[in-house]
Amino acid sequence: MLKIRFHGRGGQGVKTSSRILGRAAFLDGYIAQDSPIYGAERRGAPVVAFTRISREPILERGYIFDPDIVIVVDETLLDDERARPLDGVKSGGIVFVNTQSEQAQVENVDDKLFIKYSITDAALRVIGKPIVSSPSAAAAAKITGIISKESIIQATIDELSELGLAEEALERNLRLVSEVFDTIPTPQLKILNGETTPREVIQLEYKGVIYEDIVNVGNASLRRVGNWRIFKPIVDYQKCTGCMLCFVYCPDSVISLDAKNKPIIDYENCKGCLICVKECPLHAITAVREVKIYA
Amino acid sequence: MREVEMMTGNTAAAWAARLADVDYIPAFPITPQTEIIETLAKWIGEGLMKAKLVQFESEHSMLTAAGTASLAGARVFTASSSQGLLYGFEMLYSISGWRAPLVLVNVSRGVAAPLTLEPDHNDVLSARDSGFIQLHAENCQDVLDLILLAYRVSEDKRVRLPSIVNMDGFYLSFTREPVRIPSKEIVGEFLPPYTPTLPFCPSRPVVKGASVLSGSLYTYFKHNMHESMIRASEVIDEASRHFEELTGRPHKPVEGFYLDDAEYVLVMSNSFTTIGKKAVLRLREKGVPAGLVKLVMLRPFPAAQLARLLKNRRAVAVFDQNLSLGLGGIIYSEVAGALYNERKRPETLISVIGGLGGKYITMEEFEYIFNLLQHPEKIEPGKPVFLFRKDELRAVENTIKLAGVV
Ligand code: SF4
Ligand code: SF4
């Protein structure tokens, strides 16, 4: 059985990635299982999705703790304490990282193989938008070495049509899927050790009454969200008249005003929604592509 | 549409309602069940189904409408989960007392507080005494098949009681697997049209669910419902034999896995059974005579079948994904009751609580259970064992520290 785990952020469509891959395997005659995990997440919060592919009935469900392949759709998750995308990857397993690399690079790190490539830039080139769900599935499919191009294309058509994608957008997605599938190499997957480190079972102790109360309230501001950006809004202060519209429209209130009412953006927390870019009547704010904001 | 499709448990449930050609779907959204209703609404909008779907202002009204429509002669499908089921709870007893043979899908989710979205079975088991037949699914195929089976049995004139089909939230509701969709012809042959007894009809008045205001009348009717529920067991056997003839898929009320020579047996239900089976295979590789009993039918409770399957075993553990606070596992007590009059009952019967709020159960935890079965002297008899791991405890303690709990 091959186990693939996708890590992305809410809104990037990793559930769709896991589904496209699952359906492609199914079309190629395998037994497949795909599922996402989501709680009360919002856009931008780390999310995970899974695909299992097997010739035999799959006697597993839920979280994949010991993936053969991990697809990191958003590179900034590598440093996220909660996401921990590399946890449990089998020795000899493969990690795909969507990073600022125009060419597919392959390198060995410790006992794992890393493949680096920018599907975001490929998407911007082909679709004109940073759509990463379908190309992530294509990358995963190619890395498995057992999924045909025909099936990944068909699966993309099936899944995206189900989501109600328009003809032209679908066409571009297919071009992107095809391109990514051709670009990504298929390295030999040599799982050296399939066993995970055993986890110790314990008995819960009786400890008196424990309340579910949260005393340390209001700590959300400690969580910086600037890493969610794909584009950075940059103000041209020559053009800006200080009309304050961007300040009003920013949904996250990360724009403050200086003495002359000129906007100052808190880049540690600007999520890159680009509403300010759209709203500025003088087109004084431009969007600039960026990858890693801070570690 | 392909004969086999990748689909979630929720989609499989919607497919069953579509194949059963239901007439009426009263609805109210709740995670993780909503996708069932969304799918049905979409199909109705596209003209693929003829049913009428109505969204209510609460589960209580939804279930009231479901029961009364069923009495009027409509084949009714509805679905809920967790707090939603509990909000409509009062109506469950009414629906069964009215003898309204509808099918309700419950997508299991732990009951708040504390709030969670992932599954355990306190929600569905709270309805165990209500007069609903209960069938619990292990995988997405079961979801589809058991709903069809439920309609056939519920509507049977020898039974005339409603059914709940349970599937786990997330582990089935949002998980896609290949599911075989039976043809319209096969379903038509398996499930005859619903012919209600004395349906509501303007030209012929009838009172249903009348007040009896008398203990003897009440007991008489309750005894009769109990008898019908017991009879449902035979009707399920009969229906599932027919279903197997038509589709090749057997659905027994109680299923054994590697039971023949098993000395150590784990009893469990629902989607985690899949993982339990893997554990049994692993133990077999290590030479441990392990086996598993899967409970599909929780009501009527298959006490006799269980006693037959569990007698002469060395040790049995009951895995409860539920918790009756102050008692322990609900199914453990029921299994113990079923075994009491069996003279060759296993000497050791262990209660294990696991998977509350969807807590994942690892191979190590399953192996731990089988270890206890081989060395029961390590624990206090009858006291439930709570499965937990050190790595989980560390994470929990960390969270509690962050929350600032004093
Ligand atoms: S991009 Fe969005 S979050 Fe960032 S400053 Fe502009 S409006 Fe605010
Ligand atoms: S909306 Fe444009 S012009 Fe107005 S304050 Fe913001 S950047 Fe300046």
Image: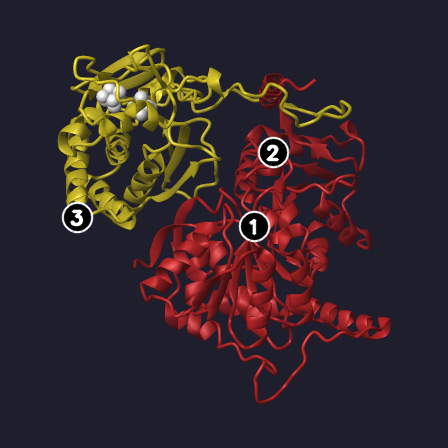
Quadrant housing residue B72: bottom right
Please, what is the three-letter code of the amino acid marked with disc 1?
Answer: Ser
Q: Which residue is mark 2?
A: B366
| Chain A, colour shown | yellow
Mark 1 is surrounded, within 10 Å at the Cα level, by few (under 14), some (14 to 19) or many (20 or more) other residues, namely many
- Judging depth in this view, the residue of B273 and B136 nearest the camera is B136
- The N terminus of chain B sits in image quarter: bottom left
Real-space CA distance between mark 2 and mark 1, rounded to the nearest whole angstrom = 27 Å
Real-space CA distance between mark 2 and mark 3, rounded to the nearest whole angstrom = 49 Å
* Residue B195 appears in the rendering: yes
N-terminal of the pair, mark 2 or mark 1, is: 1
Q: Chain of mark 1?
A: B
**x, y (%) of residue A230?**
27, 23
Q: Which residue is mark 1?
A: B81
The answer as to whether the residues below labels 2 and 3 share one chain is no
Please, what is the three-letter code of the amino acid marked with disc 3?
Answer: Glu
| Chain B, colour shown | red
Q: Which residue is mark 3?
A: A167
> Element at badge 2?
helix
Q: Chain of mark 2?
A: B
Residue A71, disc: none
Real-space CA distance between mark 3 and mark 1, rounded to the nearest whole angstrom = 37 Å
